[in-house]
Amino acid sequence: MTTGLFITFEGIDGAGKSTQLDYAVNYLRSKEKKVIQTREPGGTPISEKVRNMILETNSPLDSETEVLLMFAARKEHIARVIRPALDSGSIVVCDRFTDATFAYQGGGSGVSSSRIETVEAWVQGDFQPDLTLFFDLPIKIAQRRMGQRKKDRFESEALDFHERVRHAYLERAKKSPERIKVIDSSQTKGQIRELVQAELDRVCT
């Protein structure tokens, strides 16, 4: 039985998710909370190798292969990092989790939700985050914000791919409004931080 809290950060590329995640971790630590910061795909030595295979490869990957690799990395991550941390009473803050698979491999690449759900049930059972913050922004604005920075394989996809990803995220938020909180990333960083802080205070008190 877990006693900690599992909080995930999701967002389209360029929406400022990573900046707000770092703020959240520092905020929780300032409140003397024990926080473990991690990411997906990744989080363990093996899972980080899978991350490199998926994000940095120059060779095309079959979309269903991507799903299986994502969940293989996730299974290791849950077993080695997330569950032990939760069992110790820590707050685990994770940069992306299963919602990203439904958004990128599902919405973006067209893998059916039923296939992803089948693997999800095997790997996770009923294990889900306690809170997910989804940072939303119109795709064209997000692309401008990314500018000329080096992009991974998904960030380099065409605009219509990212539109499908965004739509998939928003559809999941509609289905799970108690867990997934949508944050409008067109606001100022200060305004976004206030919203993030309010959600953290709500679940961590």
Image (spheres, grey):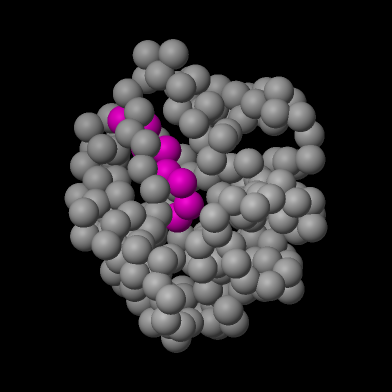
Vertical position of residue 62 compared to residue 146: above or below:
below
Residue, x 78% and y 34% (percent of image)? 187
Vertical position of residue 173 compared to residue 196: above or below:
below
Residue, x 60% and y 24% (percent of image)? 197
Find residue 185 and report its image quarter: top right
Whether residue 179 can be seen here = no
Q: Residue furthest bottom?
A: 62
Whether residue 40 can be seen here = yes
Foreground residue, 73 or 131? 73
Residue, x 46% and y 60% (percent of image)? 98
Q: Residue 143 location, x and y as percent?
A: 72, 55
Q: Residue 43 location, x and y as percent?
A: 30, 49
Instruction: Say left or right for 83 vs 162.
Output: left
Q: Residue 106 location, x and y as percent?
A: 56, 75
Disc tally is: 0
Dominant SS in magenta: strand
Residue, x 76% and y 29% (percent of image)? 188
Q: Is residue 140 magenta?
A: no
Instruction: Say left or right for 78 vs 116.
Output: left
Q: Point out the stretch of residues depicted in magenta.
A: 90-97
